[in-house]
Image (tube, grey):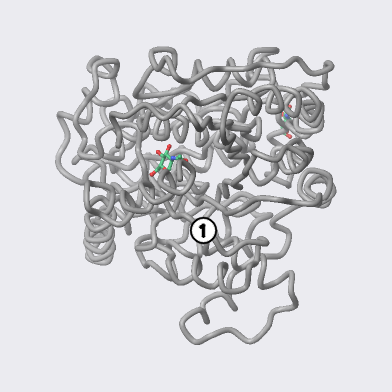
Amino acid sequence: MANQPITSVAVVMVPLPAQGHLNQLLHLSRLVSVYDIPIHFISTTTHTRQAKTRVHGWDPLSKTNINFHEFPTPPFNNPPPNPNSSIKFPSQIIPSLHASTNLRDPVYKLIQKLSKTTQRIVIIYDSLMAYVVQDIRSIPNAESFCFQSSSAFTIYSLYWEAVGKPLLPFKACHIENVPLEDCFPLEIQELVKVLYDVPKSNTGDIYNTSRLIDGIYLDLLAEAKATGTNKLFAIGPFNPISLLGTKNQENNQNKCLLWLDKQEPNSVLFISFGTTSSLTDEQINEIAIGLEKSEHKFIWVLRDADKGDVFEGEIRKAPLPEGYEERVKERGIIVRDWAPQLEILGHGSTGGFISHCGWNSCMESISLGVPIGAWPMHSDQPGNAFLVTKVLRIGVEVKDWARRDEVIDSITVEKVVRRLLGSEEGDEIRKRAKELGEIVRESVVEGGDTKKEMDSFIAHITR
Ligand SMILES: *[C@@H]1O[C@H](CO)[C@@H](O)[C@H](O)[C@H]1NC(C)=O
Ligand SMILES: *[C@@H]1O[C@H](CO)[C@@H](O)[C@H](O)[C@H]1NC(C)=O
C-alpha cells in the first residue's frame, strides 16, 4: 500500500503551539506521509517556524507532501519564564496559547477549502486544540481524531479523579496512589476550560504510547469512553531516527556524542528538564554540587524554559558555581542549547536519565532502555513519574511530588546519581529498563504491535 498514491484522503495536523506538542504532530506528519498521504500542518506563523527549525533527525522541507500553513495572530504578551516561581507550569506561554484561539476561523476556512478537492479530509488535532477545530462538525466529509500527548496511565488517572474516584478494577489499583493535587495551577485549569470544553465530534483518539507500556489503561479509557470515544490507536513509540544508537550525519560531529564514544558502558548520567520549566539559581547550584560530588560522568542540558515566542527577547543564562565548568571538564558536559537527546539516550555509555518526566522524554527513555531519575514539575509529569518508578519500576524518585515546593539539596542529588549509576539496585533497575526497551522496540518493526496499529489507523482513514 505504501507505494500507491492515495489521492482521496488528506490529513490536517493542528498542534498545540508548545514545543513538546508541535514536535509530536510534526513527527506524526512524517509517519503518515510515508503512506503517500498529503499532509497539511497548521499553526501560527512563529510556531510553524519553531517546529521546522527545531526538528531533529530529518528535514521536513524535503518531504514534498507535507505542506506548512501559517497564520498570524494578534501580538501577544511574551514574558520570560520566571525561575523563581514556585509553580513550574510555564505560565509565560499562556498568552501565546490564548492567541492561538485566533486560528479557529482560518483553520476552518482552510479545511473547508481542502474538503472540496478531497474525498475525505482527516483532522488530527492536539487535545487542547479542540476549541480551534470545533467548527469542522459542519463539514460533511471531515473526520477528526484527537491526539493525546500524554500517557494513557496519567490520562486515565485524571479521568478517574474527575468522575469521583470510583472503585477500581484490581489490575488498575495503582491509580489510587497517583499524586494529582496541584498538578494544574488554577490559571491553566481556566485556560483548559476554554481550549477543551467545547462540543467534540472526533471519531477516535491517537496515543503516542504502546500497549506494552500502559495497555491496561488504554482499555479502561476505551471501556469508559473517558474522552468520548472508544476507538483508540496506540501508535508509539515512533522515533524519528534509528533507535539503536547509530549516528545520523548531522550529528557526526556533535561534541556530546563524540565524548560519549570514549566513555565506559552505562557510565554517564544524562540530565535535562525539557522546554517548559526553569529552575531557581539556588536549585541549579545544588544540582551542580551534587553532580560534582557524585564523581560520576554527566551531560547536563541547562537551558531556560521556552517563551511563548521563542524568537523574541533575551534568554537567561543560569549561573553555575564559580570555576565549576573548569573543575568538572574531564567528567561533565554542560549544554546550554540543544542536545541530541534521542541519540544520547540511545548511546551505550548512557546509564541513566534525570528527567522532568514529560511524556516524550519518558517514551524516549523507555524505548531506549534507560532508567529514569524522576523529577516531575507540573501537569501530567507527576503521574508519568509514578508510572515509571512505581508501576514499570524502571526508575527512582529524585523529587517526590509531595516535596514540590522544596529545593532538592546536593546530597539528595548525589545519592540518586550513585543509586542509578553505581549500585546493585541501579543495575537491577537498568536491567528491567533494558528488557522493557527491547520489547517496546520490537513492537515498531514490521509485524510488531505498534506497526500493526499504525497500519490499521491508516487503513481506517483510507477505507
Ligand atoms: C513519540 O514518542 C517518541 C519517543 O519515543 C518521539 O521521539 C516521537 O517523536 C513521538 N511521536 C509522535 C508522533 O508523537
Ligand atoms: C530570582 O531570585 C534571585 C535570588 O533571590 C534573584 O537574584 C533573581 O534576580 C531573581 N530572578 C528573577 C528573574 O526574578
Q: Closest to the observer: 354 or 144?
A: 144
Residue drawn at x 65%, y 39% is 142
For image coordinates 51% across by 18% down, the residue present is: 52
Instruction: Give the image quarter of residue 230.
Output: bottom right
| Up-down relation of residue 308 to residue 200 (above or below) | above
* The residue at label 1 has a CB less than 8 Å from ligand 1: no
In the displayed structure, 208 sits above or below 179; it is above
Q: Quadrant of residue 418?
A: bottom left
353 sits to left or right of 41? left
Horizontal and vertical percent position of residue 117: 60, 23
- Residue bearing mark 1: 232
Choose between 352 and 61: the one closer to the eye: 61
Q: In which quarter of the image is ligand 2?
A: top right
Helix, strand or loop at label 1? It is: strand
Relative image position of residue 170 (x, y in whole percent): 49, 87
Q: Position of residue 121 (x, y in %)?
A: 59, 34
Horizontal side of 323 relative to 104 (left or right) equals left
Task: Look at the image and tell me in which quarter the C terminus lies.
Answer: top left
Q: In this image, 133 relative to 335: left or right?
A: right
Residue at the image point whose x is 29% and y is 15% from the top: 250
Name the kind of residue labelled 1 in the image: Leu
Q: How crowded is mark 1: few (under 14 residues within 10 Å), some or many (20 or more)?
A: many
